[in-house]
């Protein structure tokens, strides 16, 4: 009976070692799958990010063109108004200077009421 018990214990130990190997392989497989899943997710995220970045740049380019055109038109209008003001200033410069000098050198005081 002792030999039979010893053989039974040995069989149990062998089964336990085999089960341990199976569990270890399962852990390794699971770790490998988790790594693969993480890598796949990173690739998908990068692809999605690149796609959205391209869409954003396209959107920005389309809408920036409109802003640039409006900005250029506003600058042209502003330059035209500045030119008009400068021309008017040049045209009436002598009269304004004479009026200012006359007001300084020939005061006409008025009584306060």
Image: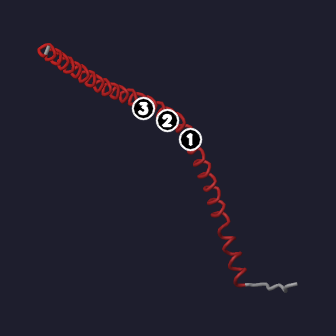
Which quarter of the picture shows residue 84? Answer: bottom right
**Contact, mark 1 vs mark 3 (Cβ under 8 Å):** no
The disc at residue 39 is none
Outermost residue on the left side: it is 3
43, 1: nearer the viewer: 1
Distance of mark 2 from mark 3, alpha carbons? Answer: 18 Å
From the viewer's perspective, tell me whether residue 110 is left or right of residue 85: right
Mark 3 lies on residue? 49
Q: Position of residue 12 (x, y in %)?
A: 20, 18
Q: Earlier in the sequence, mark 2 or mark 3?
A: 3
Q: Earlier in the sequence, mark 1 or mark 3?
A: 3
40, 15: nearer the viewer: 15
Which quarter of the picture shows residue 10? Answer: top left
Tag nearer the camera, 1 or 3: 3
The disc at residue 67 is 1
Count of all numbered marks drawn on residues in the image: 3
Relative to residue 8, is residue 49 depicted above or below?
below
Assign a secondary structure to mark 1. Answer: helix
Q: Residue at x 56, y 41 (%)?
A: 67
Distance of mark 1 from mark 3, alpha carbons? Answer: 26 Å
């Amino acid at each position: 009976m002792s030999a039979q018990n010893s053989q039974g214990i040995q069989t149990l130990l062998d089964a336990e070692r085999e089960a341990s190997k199976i569990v270890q392989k399962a852990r390794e497989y699971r770790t490998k799958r988790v790594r693969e899943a993480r890598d796949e997710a990173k690739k998908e995220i990068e692809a999605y990010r690149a796609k959205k970045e391209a869409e954003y740049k396209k959107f920005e380019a389309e809408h920036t063109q409109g802003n640039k055109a409006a900005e250029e038109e506003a600058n042209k209008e502003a330059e035209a108004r500045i030119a008009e003001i400068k021309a008017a200033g040049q045209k009436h410069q002598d009269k304004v200077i004479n009026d200012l000098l006359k007001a300084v050198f020939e005061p006409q005081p008025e009584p306060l009421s």
